[in-house]
Image: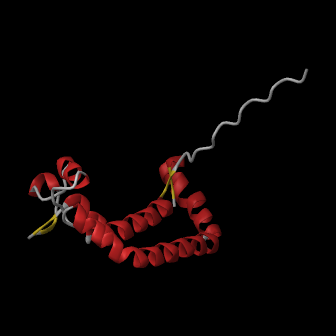
Amino acid sequence: MAPRKKARRPRRARSFSLTNAAFSLGYANILSTGIFGTNVAGFLLGKDSGGYGSSIVSGTGISFQELVGIASGGGSAAGGDLAQIQSNLKDNLPSMLIQSVTLSVTERIFKSVMRRPIANVNRNIVRPLLGNMVRV
């Protein structure tokens, strides 16, 4: 009888990619703008008269209790209660889909065009300075 093959181990990225983080932030910005009417910084940190600040300092950020309140149908946040959030989502869904598809196409084109320059920067600048934990 033939010996059993070992199960394949899942491959995981061993480093943090700055380009992937930038595109993920773009997707998060599309979602938060379309649903809550504010960008990611405004959603997470809150907005007061002095601009964007820490929710701990200004007290205007969205807390966990507010998120639970929104999910249960009450409460308010940057975009309002659940009915307002549903209305925003219904109104902004076509725009959000177009923005997401555009960002996806842009991401693919950018990564294919910039593959060699980014590899050069990673190999010659980033890896000697930061090691294998961060890449562009």
Residue 39: tell me if it is visible: no
Depth check, front residue: 116 or 36:
36
Q: Is residue 128 left or right of residue 79?
A: right
Q: Is residue 37 above or below residue 21?
A: below
Where is residue 19 shown, x and y percent of the image? 49, 64
Please report the residue visible at 19 percent of the width from the left and 62 percent of the height from the top: 81
Please report the residue visible at 41 percent of the width from the left and 79 percent of the height from the top: 95
Where is residue 120 shown, x and y percent of the image? 61, 64
Specify how the rendered protein is coloured: secondary structure
Q: Is residue 47 left or right of residue 37?
A: left
Q: Quadrant of the N terminus?
A: top right
Where is residue 73 shown, x and y percent of the image? 21, 55
The furthest residue to the right: 1
Q: Is residue 8 above or below residue 90?
A: above
Depth check, front residue: 77 or 54:
77
Where is residue 104 shown, x and y percent of the image? 53, 71
Displayed quadrant of residue 85? bottom left
Q: How many marks?
A: 0
Residue 112: tell me if it is visible: yes
Please report the residue visible at 14 percent of the width from the left and 51 percent of the height from the top: 56
Q: Is residue 40 left or right of residue 15?
A: left
Please report the residue visible at 37 percent of the width from the left and 67 percent of the height from the top: 31
Depth check, front residue: 70 or 129:
70
Depth check, front residue: 44 or 19:
44
